[in-house]
Amino acid sequence: PGTKYTGGAYTSYFPPRVLTKLDNWQAYRQVEKAPNVFFAGADYHAGFGNGYIEGAIRSGQYAADRIRQRLFGDKDNQMELKTE
């Protein structure tokens, strides 16, 4: 049975034609959704692992990197966002 927000899916549910719009994927790639508000998790990762633990780990590492950079200016220990 479906639910209001997931449509019965185990991960993000989007109605038809939502994922084919580039702007929607660009929003997923931005971990900072508002000033100093960072989202991370399997459903917030665009690319390999979206919806799975792999995506959650990659997303969390990337968000933590952005936060570390914001707080400490640490540019030597940054992780690249891998989307493949």
Image (cartoon, rainbow, N blue to C red):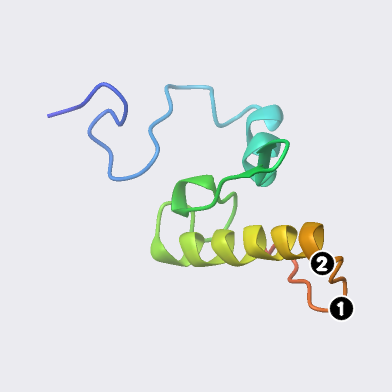
Residues at marks 2 and 1, CA–CA distance in whole angstroms: 11 Å
Describe the element under mark 1 as helix, strand or loop: loop
Q: Residue furthest bottom?
A: 76
Relative to 21, is 45 on the left or the right? left
**In the rendered image, which quarter is residue 26 located in?**
top right
Check disc 1 and report the residue beneath it.
76
Q: Give the residue type at disc 2.
A: Phe
Q: Give the residue type at disc 1.
A: Asp
Q: In the rendered view, tell whether residue 48 sits above or below residue 4.
A: below
Residue 61 showing in the rendered view: yes
Image location of residue 34, percent across then percent down:
68, 33
The residue lying at 71 percent from left, 58 percent from top is 67
72 or 38, which is in the foreground? 72
Image location of residue 82, percent across then percent down:
68, 64
Residue 83 showing in the rendered view: no
Quadrant in which the C terminus is drawn: bottom right
The residue lying at 86 percent from left, 78 percent from top is 76
Relative to 33, is 80 on the left or the right? right
Which mark is on residue 72?
2
Q: In the rendered view, tell whether residue 12 sits above or below residue 3.
A: below
The residue lying at 42 percent from left, 22 percent from top is 15
Relative to 9, is 12 on the left or the right? right
Which label sits in the foreground, 2 or 1?
2
Image location of residue 10, percent across then percent down:
28, 45
**In the rendered image, which quarter is residue 62 located in?**
bottom right
1 or 5, which is in the foreground? 5
Which mark is on residue 57?
none
What is the crowding at mark 1: few (fewer than 14 residues within 10 Å), some, or many (at least 20)? few
Quadrant in which the N terminus is drawn: top left
Q: In the rendered view, tell whether residue 17 sits above or below residue 65.
A: above
Q: Residue furthest front?
A: 71
